[in-house]
Amino acid sequence: MTDFSAWTQACQARIEGVLAECLPASRIAPQRLHEAMRYAVLGGGKRVRPLLAFAAGEVSGADVGRVQHAAAAVELIHAYSLVHDDMPAMDDDALRRGKPTVHVEFDEATALLVGDALQSLAFDILASQPLADDAATQLKMVQLLAQASGSRGMAGGQAIDLASVGKPLDLTELEFMHIHKTGALIRAAVLLGAHCGSLDETAHTSLDHYAKCIGLAFQVVDDVLDAEASTATLGKTAGKDAADNKPTYVSLLGVTRARELAQELRADAHAALAELGAPAERLRQLADFVVERTF
């Protein structure tokens, strides 16, 4: 087995190529919209969601050619969410992945259309590529991403987040928000990767529990980094949660307890993979990466 760093670089290069191929070329009309779509998606980001899809595909014995398109669909949804989240009506940020946000580099109307078009493209890919052994499974994958993206998933979590500014939330309420806002799409990435192959129901349940733990851990670490890391390190504006008076794991628990919670979630994620053996090693490594990352 290649080391984790080499594997992540190979997967990141693969998904970059797939995304570049799936996105319309900037020379195709409407050129400005297509240029902005490519600007929003390519050349940046950790690609955590595609990595999780690739790793789950290894557990289910999936063909990587299938997984790469499922991974691309998830990443396009994630990219669209960032474009919209950064806009003045939402989080109002001028920096993302170390460069101006889409509405700053282009304009607000274009940024809205970029998000709309990226979301549509994600489902185009899921519907048009051969991803599963049967049509029923592929249809389930479309439904899975739709639910993870909508009012019962990411969009709903963002709505709760916006409504919670300046309000004290307890731990249960904070977890509910982030299970939707951040966790839903991370869970979808794992399950879509797994559905590209074949697993029994018990294994799917184990992966689902793993994904829920990692989704929360990712957000806990994000909150810690927002409080402690620099803008240069993060590639986005640091300290913005506190400046905007948003409820976070750090504001509720403090940095030390938040870090402890991330470690507990990592341990729970590892435990969920115990019965899956060696094929789940990349998922274990990704759990470690999510919790130990510094950016």
Image: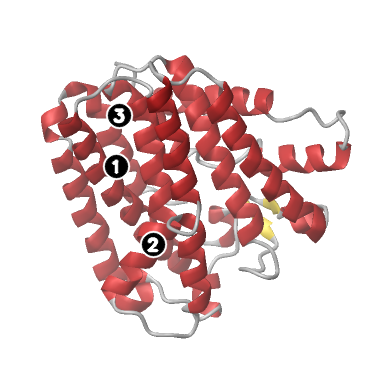
Residue 139 quadrant: top left
Residue 262 to residue 173: above or below: above
Foreground of the two, 243 or 77: 77
User: Which-is-in-front pick, marks 3 and 2?
Assistant: 2
The answer to which of 117 and 76 lies nearer the viewer is 117
Please state the horizontal and vertical placement of residue 157, each as a whole percent of the image. 45, 63
Mark 2 or mark 3, which is nearer the start of the sequence? 2
Residue 293's place in the image compared with 28, above or below, is below
**Residue sitting at x 32%, y 56%:** 216
Residue that protrudes farthest toward the left in the picture: 275
Which amino acid does the dot numbered 3 rest on? Answer: Arg
Can residue 5 be seen in this snapshot?
no
- Amino acid of disc 2: His
- Distance between the alpha carbons at the discs numbered 2 and 1: 17 Å
- Residue 74 located left or right of residue 20: left
Image quadrant where one finds the N terminus: top left
Residue 19 visible in the displayed image: yes
Q: Position of residue 245 (x, y in %)?
A: 50, 81
Q: Position of residue 172 (x, y in %)?
A: 27, 72
Label 3 element class: helix
Residue 174 to residue 21: above or below: below
Q: 10 Å neighbourhood of mark 1: few (<14), some, or many (≥20)?
A: many
Residue at numbered disc 3: 282
Looking at the image, is mark 2 or mark 1 earlier in the sequence? 2
Q: Residue at x 80, y 52 (%)?
A: 110
List the single residue furthest toward the front: 136
Q: Which mark is residue 87?
A: none
Query: Reading the chain from its start, which is encountered first: label 1 or label 3?
Result: 3
Q: State whether residue 2 is above or below residue 90.
A: above
Name the residue that disc number 1 marks.
Answer: 287
Q: Locate residue 185, reporting x and y percent.
A: 44, 47
**Mark number for residue 178?**
2
